[in-house]
Image (cartoon, helix red, strand yellow):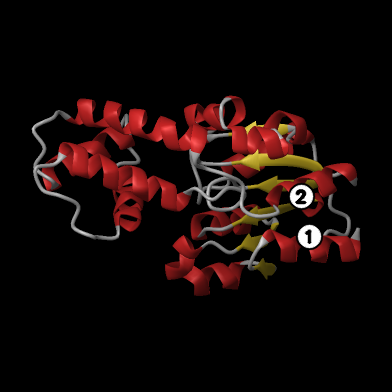
């Protein structure tokens, strides 16, 4: 698994940290705050992903997503007002609720101790990652990003986000390493597709919010783990 590897490239949301469900909670709270129609128990995470993909070529995909919520739930607020409120609601969750997945910090500590270069290659926006780095006590107290990651590339670091492999190529170029010297840890289909396109071996960390694409994810991955405890046990067998 890690033979001849130098660089471990981590995805963030849904992989290292338990955050996908939190974003659903944020949107549900937003809908119930601004809408004249209350949340209708739809799969808001799937809808959000679909809409952000639909709006990806607009100047602000999240603004258009908030416009979609305005229309669907018949809000009297503007999409700009809804987006502002979404960030205000999100700030509390980002700073106080989101945490590493169980034992993720122990994997980071062990790999760092063994001399691996650790990086983050994420489609998360820069503001969110700054919240994690500077204000989230769960993350800071367990494994501060600045202490463990040599590079952190977010959505603003590239023109094309996953499944485009640009962020992975940029990581390799910056560190001057070959694809054979890297391994990616991902949870989602777009993540494993990006790694496949870049020709990098992929490990998959289970996240229930990716179950809909499980067969495709498994097809593109080298090894799969239910949790970080399993991953740490496997790493210790090799390193």
Which percent across, then down, holds residue 64? 24, 36
- Element under disc 1: helix
Point out which mark residue 106 bears: 2
Q: Residue at x 44, y 37 (%)?
A: 93
Q: Is residue 214 above or below residue 175?
A: below
Residue 172 appears in the figure: yes
Q: Residue at x 61, y 52 (%)?
A: 101
Crowding at label 1, few (<14), some or many (≥20) Cα neighbours within 10 Å? some
Which percent across, then down, holds residue 124? 50, 38
Crowding at label 2, few (<14), some or many (≥20) Cα neighbours within 10 Å? some
Q: Is residue 201 above or below residue 132?
A: below
Which percent across, then down, holds residue 80? 22, 26
Which percent across, then down, holds residue 94? 48, 35
Inter-mark Cα distance, 1 to 2: 8 Å
> Do the CB atoms of the residues marked 1 and 2 lie less than 8 Å apart?
yes
Q: Residue at x 40, y 46 (%)?
A: 23
């Amino acid at each position: 698994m890690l033979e001849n590897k130098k660089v471990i490239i981590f995805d963030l949301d849904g992989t290292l940290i338990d955050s996908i469900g939190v974003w659903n909670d944020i949107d549900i709270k937003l809908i119930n705050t601004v809408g004249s129609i209350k949340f209708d128990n739809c799969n808001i995470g799937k809808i959000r992903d679909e809409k952000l993909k639909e709006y990806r070529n607009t100047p602000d995909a999240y603004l258009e997503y908030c416009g979609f919520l305005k229309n669907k739930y018949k809000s009297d607020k503007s999409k700009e007002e809804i987006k502002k409120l979404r960030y205000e609601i999100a700030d509390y969750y980002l700073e106080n609720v989101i945490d590493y997945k169980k034992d993720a910090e122990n994997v980071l500590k062990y790999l760092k101790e063994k001399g691996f270069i650790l990086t983050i290659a994420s489609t998360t926006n820069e503001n969110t990652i700054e919240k994690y780095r500077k204000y989230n006590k769960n993350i800071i107290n367990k494994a501060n990003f600045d202490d463990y990651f040599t590079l952190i590339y977010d959505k603003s670091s590239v023109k094309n986000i996953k499944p485009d492999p640009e962020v992975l190529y940029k990581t390799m170029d910056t560190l001057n390493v070959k694809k054979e010297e890297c391994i990616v840890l991902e949870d989602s289909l777009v993540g494993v597709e990006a790694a496949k396109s870049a020709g990098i071996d992929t490990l998959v960390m289970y996240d229930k919010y990716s179950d809909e694409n499980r067969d495709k994810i498994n097809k593109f991955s080298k090894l799969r783990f239910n949790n970080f405890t399993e991953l740490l046990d496997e790493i210790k067998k090799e390193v």
